Image (cartoon, rainbow, N blue to C red):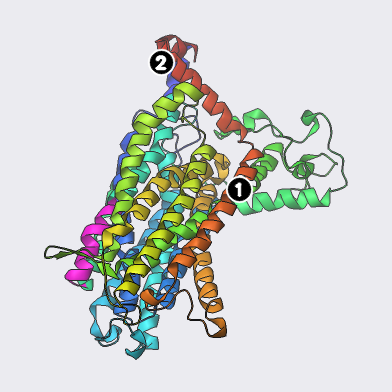
Amino acid sequence: MAGQEEALDEYTQDGTVDLKGNPVRRSNTGGWRACSFIVVYEVFERMAYYGISSNLILYLTKKLHQGTVTSANHVTNWVGTIWITPILGAYIADAHLGRYWTFVIASVIYISGMSLLTLTVSLPSLRPPRCSQTTNMEKCKKASTLQLAVFYGALYTLAIGTGGTKPNISTIGADQFDDFNPKEKAHKLSFFNWWFFSIFLGTFFANTVLVWIQDNVGWTLGYALPTLGLAISIAIFMAGTPFYRHKVPAGSPFTRMAKVIVAAIRKWRVRIPNDPKELYELDLEEYAKKGKFRIDSTPTLRFLTKASVKIGSTNEWMLCSVTQVEETKQMVRMIPIWVATVVPSIMIAQVNTLFVKQGATLERGIGSFEIPPASLAAFVTISLLVSVMLYDRFFVKIMRRWTKNPRGITLLQRMGVGLFMHILIMIIASLTERYRLRVAKEHGLVENGGQVPLTIFILLPQFVLMGIADAFLDVAKIEFFYDQAPENMKSLGTSYSMTTLGAGNFLSSFLLSTVSHITKKHGHRGWILNNLNASHLDYYYTFFVILNFLNFIFFLIVIKFYVYKAEVSDSIKVLTEELKGMTVKVSDQEESRR
């Protein structure tokens, strides 16, 4: 009997298979061995992406001769698309191709877009002639329709490619840890922290070395290096193929949820039985065969429970299993949390737009070396890297003693800290901009838009705090949406965290255009002009302070009613017992009991 259990334990219990669909052994697949390829991939891929996005606003203004509002909106619209397309990639992965093949195909599209983009910045015929104007871009010749079509065609081809890679790469990484094995589950708790660590290593290189090359050497080399980096990252990912575990596509998550909603509506007059056992559910063996969880009925969102009430019909659009209903509930329950994370995504959008434009108005010299304005984003990376390491190595261990939670604090509590920090960030940003404008006025630089005699490092606090906030909010956000998503909808759950960034960037474009338009009415100069010395970004940032405060209150209300999904709670209990066992050194006894 013990021999049979040992043989069974050699294989993963979560339904993962190899590329041919065969069960996989735990000893030679998955775990940190497989994740090492994914982590290294992420370093190079993030270097490629941020090598383009970090300095894009300066390319649009300096090379394509666009104004502040126009260029900022083009950046946020493109970044918004980058973070919205993962919904499509998640659907294709979960419903049809699986995560691995969706990722591989999307990578081909991604590298094609990057290559075309490098070509557009390299050929003089694909951009307007050089302009000597630095503050009044209206006098410069604009890019032609053909030039813009090729440039934005490359950008949005790239965006389509990332739609297939972004929601699947982190999910593939998390799939390498078996939730049915407590030790692998423990490693999975740290995976997202270190995955984010790899992201920002690549980001740091992009925001320092690549940005400097673009500003001082040339855009051709500055874009060719990210393209090369992406090619290297794809090669690294492919090299790890023999070690990966794969989840079999479980059908369209949208169809599964639609069936529940339609069935509940069609049976809206049906009474829900008091005993949950009277609801329709598949046998436990059906789930065990597929390595999936069966979920018990919960009292939340009771209207959807009607979909599993038996009325004699077995039509899939009239009768759904309790597990299918609960999966739909889980995705619906996360929507208010999703809404609460959109506003901080608007703040993140400012890092590569208005924050960079502010830096361009300040003194950037250190001796003979001139700091590229976009390089300040490197301090977001540095502070995030340090914060993640301190959080994982010290904060979690200290808090675990008090809370008895393996994560130290809950994911929602961690997100709440990040949301509160965004209020502080925008307060500091507003006060700093007010100081910058006062110095510009004192030196008579308002009308001519000249360089303000202040060091660019006065912007440092808002960049550093943004990195610390990301260490709390962004890491927790992606882990939260992954963990809380049903097993069959992990890619879709991961895309939730990404679409908040997309929605935030689109809202940033909307707010920037709307505020710029409204504040110019009735003869006023407006808050956001091409000449930032004559603008009032301090007012705009104060508006963001109010928006963040209201959003924080909304978040506190939402989390009061949020209920964590059942299987995550169960796995946390298992892990808690494992940790207790390690403390009293009876892990061998626990292993024999398992």
Residue 566 magenta-highlighted: no
Is disc 2 placed on a helix, strand or loop?
helix
In this orientation, which residue lies closer to the viewer: 412 or 279?
412
Q: Which residues are magenta?
A: 202-218
The amino acid beneath tag 1 is Ile
Asked whether the viewer can see residue 327, the reply is yes
Q: Could you say which disc has been placed on residue 553 in the image?
A: 1
Residue 222 locus on image (x, y percent): 22, 67
Q: Residue at x 31, y 78 (%)?
A: 444
* In front of the other: 419 or 441: 441
Residue depicted at x 29% and y 83%: 126
Instruction: Report whether 385 appears left or right of 589.
Output: left
Residue 582 - label: 2
Where is residue 63 shown, x and y percent of the image?
29, 80
Viewer-nearest residue: 318 or 365: 365
Nearest to N terminus: mark 1 or mark 2: 1
> Comparing marks 1 and 2, which lies closer to the viewer?
1
Which residue is outermost to the front?
442
- The answer to whether any part of residue 44 appears in the image is no
Q: Residue furthest left?
A: 368
| Residue 208 shown in magenta | yes
